[in-house]
């Protein structure tokens, strides 16, 4: 069955040259592995174009900022879940079913959201405050991680929620 070219989460040209993505990755996002950012499904299909490069660049700068301020590293895709970074629509449906209340087309599916925590001395409130100061426009505070995204905001005021 032919794949739908309008669905970027399941369609990829078979002859796509991945070298430019590898170059961009190695030179601009040196602290991230692809396994840290992409869900297993997107990783297996090599759908690296599903990440929003500006959002990932902001996350790289934020990681550097957190490390310089606290001397503690920042990690994405932590814990048992492998769905903390960019995910497919099918994976998002699983998250919505399992946890309830999760948006069907979340910022994760748009490649603009990452769930992060610190390697040690994790304090979600402290990390969330740093993220807001840094300019993330979507910040969700959970007991073991903080959701960060770069959603559009008319007035620049971030959307913040606690669970």
Image (tube, rainbow, N blue to C red):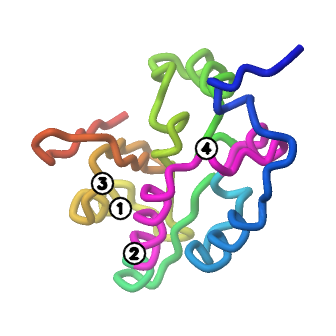
Residue 79 percent across, percent down from the top left: 66, 50
Q: Tell which of 134 and 3 is nearer to you.
A: 3
For label 4, the residue is: 50
Please report whichever mark, 2 or 4, sits nearer to the chain's N-terminal start: 4
Say whether disc 2 or disc 3 marks the residue closer to the N-terminus.
2
* Tag in front: 2 or 4: 4
Disc 1 vs disc 2: Cβ atoms closer than 8 Å?
yes
Task: Determine the CA span between mark 1 and mark 2.
Answer: 8 Å
Q: Secondary structure at mark 1?
A: helix
- Label 1 – label 3 distance at C-alpha: 12 Å
* Residues at circles 1 and 3 in contact by the CB criterion of under 8 Å: no
Q: Which part of the image, by quadrant, shows the C terminus?
A: top left
Q: Label 4 near label 1: C-beta < 8 Å?
A: no
Q: Which residue is mark 2?
A: 66
Q: Are marks 2 and 3 in contact (CB under 8 Å)?
A: no
Residue 102 drawn at (x, y percent): 48, 23
- Mark 4 vs mark 3, CA separation in Å: 19 Å
- State whether residue 12 is above or below residue 79: above
The residue at which mark 3 appears reads as 136
């Amino acid at each position: 069955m032919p794949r739908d070219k309008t669905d970027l989460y399941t369609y990829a040209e078979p002859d796509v040259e991945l070298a430019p993505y590898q170059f961009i990755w190695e030179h601009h996002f040196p602290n991230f592995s692809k396994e840290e950012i992409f869900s297993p499904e997107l990783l297996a299909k090599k759908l690296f174009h599903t990440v929003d490069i500006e959002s990932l660049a902001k996350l790289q700068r934020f990681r550097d900022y957190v490390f310089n301020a606290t001397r503690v590293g920042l990690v994405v895709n932590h814990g048992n879940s492998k769905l903390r970074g960019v995910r497919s629509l099918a994976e998002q449906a699983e998250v919505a079913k399992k946890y309830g209340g999760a948006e069907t087309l979340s910022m994760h599916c748009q490649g603009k959201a990452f769930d992060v925590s610190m390697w040690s001395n994790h304090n979600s409130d402290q990390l969330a405050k740093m993220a807001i100061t840094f300019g993330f426009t979507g910040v969700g505070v959970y007991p073991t991680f903080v959701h960060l995204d770069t959603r559009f905001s008319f007035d620049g005021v971030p959307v913040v929620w606690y669970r």
